Image: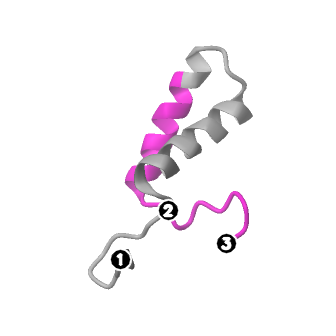
Amino acid sequence: MPRGDKSFYTDKQKRQAEHIEAGYREQGVSKQEAEERAWLTVNKKDHGGKKSGSGRKDHH
């Protein structure tokens, strides 16, 4: 997966990142920094991008 590719994230994860990014922007953080922090937060919470669905297997 190329760096910056968000195709493996669910719509919910993308909305969460946008919301988190907006919060950082309100605090005066630059757009790039806010976006990076937002995706780090989503990755930490959900362990990376995931497609949901019946065919998905967890390998934990």
Relative depth, front residue between 49 and 59 = 59
Q: Residue at x 41, y 70 (%)?
A: 51
Q: Residue at x 59, y 60 (%)?
A: 6
Q: Earlier in the sequence, mark 2 or mark 3?
A: 3
For residue 56: magenta?
no
- Pointers 2 and 3 in contact (C-beta within 8 Å): yes
For residue 17: magenta?
yes
Which element is circle 3 on?
Answer: loop
Which element is circle 2 on?
Answer: loop
Q: Residue at x 35, y 77 (%)?
A: 58
Q: Residues within 10 Å of mark 1 (few under 14, many from 20)?
A: few
Nearest to the eye among marks 1 and 3: give it: 1
Q: Amino acid at mark 2?
A: Gly
Q: Which mark is drawn over residue 37?
A: none
Q: Quadrant of the C terminus?
A: bottom left
Find the distance from the CA under tag 1 to the CA under tag 3.
19 Å
- Pointers 2 and 1 in contact (C-beta within 8 Å): no
* Image vertical order of residue 58 relative to residue 33, above or below: below
Nearest to the eye among marks 2 and 1: give it: 1
Which element is circle 1 on?
Answer: loop
Reading the image, the residue beneath label 3 is 1
Q: Amino acid at mark 3?
A: Met
Q: Earlier in the sequence, mark 1 or mark 3?
A: 3
Q: Earlier in the sequence, mark 2 or mark 1?
A: 2
- Pointers 1 and 3 in contact (C-beta within 8 Å): no
Reading the image, the residue beneath label 1 is 58
Q: Residue at x 46, y 58 (%)?
A: 47
- Position of 20 with respect to 25 (left or right) is left
Q: Which mark is drawn over residue 49?
A: 2
Q: Residues within 10 Å of mark 2 (few under 14, many from 20)?
A: some
Per the rendered image, the range of residues in magenta is 1-23
